[in-house]
Image (cartoon, coloured by chain):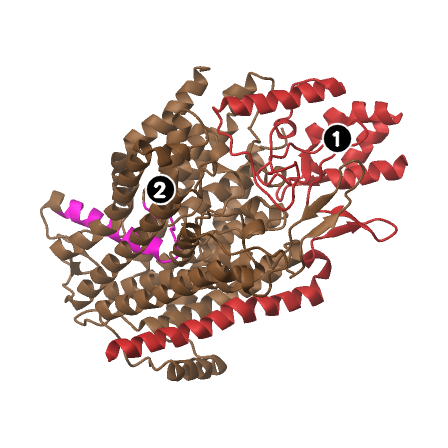
Amino acid sequence: MKYWRTVRTAFLLFGILLLISGLVYPLLLTGVAEMAFRHQAHGSLVRDEDGIVVGSELIGQNFTGPFYFEGRQSSTLGSPYNAVQSGGSNLGPSNPALLEEVNTTIRHLETLGMYGPWPSDLVTSSASGLDPHISLDAAFLQVPIIAKARGMDEEEVRTLVFEHGESDLFSLENAYVNVLSLNRALDEVDTP
Amino acid sequence: MPIANPPVDVVTIAVFLFLVTLASYFLGQYLAAVFSGKLHWNPMIRLEKALFYFIDTSTDHEDSWQGYARDLLIFNAIGFCILFLVLIIQGILPLNPQHVSGFPLSQALNIAVSFTTNTNWQVYSGETAASYLTQMIGFTVQNFLSAATGLCIAVAVMRGLTRKTTDRIGNFWVDMIRAVLYVLIPLAFIATIVLLSQGVIQNLDPSLTISGYGDAGPQTIAMGPVASQEAIKMLGTNGGGFFNANSAHPYENPTPFTNLFEIILILLIPASLPFMFGTLSGKRKQGFAIYIAMLVLFIAAVGMLYSAELSGNPALVSQGVPGVSMEGKEVRFGLAGSILFSASTTAAANGAVNTMHDSLAPLGGLVPLFLILVGEVVFGGIGSGFATMIAFVIVAVFIAGLMIGRTPEYLAKKIEIFEMKMALITILVPSILVLVFTGIALVVTDGLAGIFNPGPHGLSEVVYAFASMANNNGSAFAGLNAASPFYALTGALVMVVGRFMPAIAMLALAGSLAKKKTIPAGTGTLPTASPSFIIWLVAVILIIGALTFFPFFAMGPIAEHLSLLGGI
């Protein structure tokens, strides 16, 4: 008899806590998000002048040079920057496939006209496969190529990179840049 | 070099440790008040009383350790069954905008065990395989309840250590309700708001297809109620990501600030338990000593991981790619934000990742593996980490007692055969599981077939998998194909045994200690809050961890490190 009483208590408590933590808690917060943080809650989406969504501030896209800054390599399943299949390559440091991947990227960048030493972030895949940023080094490396392809002044492009730099929490210097913001700024200055 | 900036990184780590210590000290005081029933806020007390009445229990009724363990097991068994059911039938349930179907049975079993045991080992990819309802009433619920279960274990152990001549160690139902309502829900609520403001998403929209900008081409972006789950996933040392990329995904962890915030959430409750213990026992120094031992181990781990990653990958350097290898890392976190996360998630039994551990430098990957294998006592999983730490303290006291020829005592209680047996079960069961099942995986075809990376690294993948599951961590060298029936089924077994055998042993230990009389301290009593004892405790933890697993370390990460240096 005692066991049944215990099981009954367990079921009742589980039911209550399921309601509170599984429905009230997330749905209440969805409501709060809807009222107070609508933009963030729906993915920090970026729209063009016509109001059409062109991307998210937070999610990288698969840009290819030389007219746009390239982002990091992406190992998401199916296609690069597949935002319904996030994930990294999981290649170990001693895996020959890692070297091969890096060398393929290096050869691609070389055909665009760039040369080493290579910023590590530009030739490796990110953890999420959706990394929206590249380091400033990786951006500066691409500046001459982009300026040439677009017929722009190199200094002008470099200034854009500087202007869009972001910094770490406790650092006074900028360290990296959002590729989508940078590419949009590029198009604003130099309409394609 | 922008990715790693040692002076700034040292500042980041120092600020982080300061914030964790400060926040966990105050939370420790709060927890002590909550679980000794000293919190007086009328609306909550009325709610609590109504709940107790409804579920037919009361604060006056306390249980023996057997009763406490029985209630805990029944409650978790129900949680497991409901989650298993939800996973199988999610295809016909509402809130499923992507129309995902139910999980195959072997995977559903693994996942249900995984979330019930606070492991959150994931054999599936969140954005494609789980419906929003599953994420909410399946995963989020177990994130709360498995964390609360851990907290109950810790509270019961503390009662055992601080009470005398009674066989009662508390009422599981009361502790469970208080853990959820007073601790986890309020903290998770606040954390969610912070995350929301920074860009973590929270919606019930279906995936969004966009045309993309410039020449990037179209893109479909997964959506969902992420923030509310992210908060409790970090806070409850759960670690099961809403998305496959876990906390590396920009929608789970969008900025350097959210990154630091999430790492603090990982350690917050585990780090507050030593302080809570100090307050409850009335011997603050004892709690402080345990905290210092944890902190020492943590700082050593962070230092090792940082230096291993800083020196880069020789194979890449020779290709003209100098500096830190960014494979499997995110630019916005930098090196400090990446390794601090890796160390914290494995020190505590969290298992969320913002960096792919499979791609860490060999000696970098060794650090998370080591932190898991010593039983996650460096802060550790909610409750289970503290309980295992107490087991180590008891072993340390026992060995020291033998060396000075005195009956070992801890907190004025004699440590005898029964206590030693329970402490050793707690420490050795996960280790034995890792050794045995890694051995099996390495000789059967199904086990070998799951390995992704070649060479010594493949061994590390398998060791890491069973270490992670046996110690209820949940992070992975994720190249391993964990979804195959072999790993799904052996994994489920390892997770259950690795969670509940130590838990029951620690409750038994608590029950046994609660019965004992206290004996006055004499001249031969070993002081357990002195610096020398802290050093001794750290040494015992390191020696046991190293002795048990050194062959694996040598054949896996160390061999890989040497081969990379040699250019093989």
Q: Position of residue A82 (x, y in %)?
A: 65, 41
Q: Residues within 10 Å of mark 1 (few under 14, many from 20)?
A: few
The residues tagged by marks 2 and 1 sit, at their Cα atoms, a distance apart of 41 Å
* Lateral position of residue B303 relative to residue A133, left or right: left
Instruction: Say which colour chain A has.
Output: red
Q: Considering depth in this image, is B303 or B258 the residue closer to the camera?
A: B258
Q: Which mark is residue A170?
A: none
The residue at which mark 2 appears reads as: B466
> Residue at position x 69%, y 53% from top?
A43
The residue at which mark 1 appears reads as: A64
Q: Considering depth in this image, is B337 or B213 the residue closer to the camera?
A: B213
Q: Considering depth in this image, is B514 or B52 the residue closer to the camera?
A: B52
Q: Position of residue A3 (x, y in %)?
A: 26, 75
Asked if residue B228 is positioned above or below residue B352 in the image, the reply reads below
Residue range in magenta is B375-401
Q: Amino acid at mark 2?
A: Phe
